[in-house]
Amino acid sequence: MPDFNFDGSKRFSQNCSDFLDSTKEIDPEMAKILEANWDLLLNVVSSGEREAKARTAFNTTIIEALDNLLTSQTEAGDE
């Protein structure tokens, strides 16, 4: 995603939407995973402070989603 830059003149939510849109162009499956877990990601930084429990929850959820994606791709390839 080297060509993506946040635009300081846009609201945070618009930059987030633009980020997800750019991710869809590069890796649609990852974009779906991020979009489905966006609220968990936003909880990682709360009031300017990093929340370790929220980060752990986000990481765990993403790992499970990636594992499920790989499993479904492997099973589809075996048929």
Image: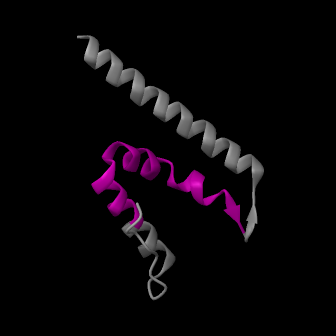
Front residue of this view, candidates 70 and 35:
70
Q: Kindly identify the residue that appears in the image at 71 percent across and 65 percent down.
A: 46
- Tell me residue 10's x, y (percent): 44, 84
- Tell me residue 28's x, y (percent): 31, 47
Q: Kindly identify the residue that appears in the image at 50 percent across and 76 percent down.
A: 12
The span shown in magenta is 19-46
Instruction: List the single residue furthest toward the front.
Output: 2
User: Main SS of the magenta segment?
Assistant: helix
User: Relative to residue 64, is residue 78 depicted above or below?
Assistant: above
- Please tell me whether residue 37 belongs to the stretch shown in magenta: yes
Q: Kindly identify the residue that appears in the image at 35 percent across and 23 percent down.
A: 72
- Please tell me whether residue 6 belongs to the stretch shown in magenta: no
Hey, which quadrant is residue 5 in on the image? bottom left
Looking at the rendered image, the quarter that the N terminus falls into is bottom left
4 relative to 38 in the view: left or right? left
Hey, which quadrant is residue 23 in on the image? bottom left
User: Relative to residue 15, is residue 66 depicted above or below?
Assistant: above
- Tell me residue 63's x, y (percent): 55, 34
Front residue of this view, candidates 50 and 74:
74
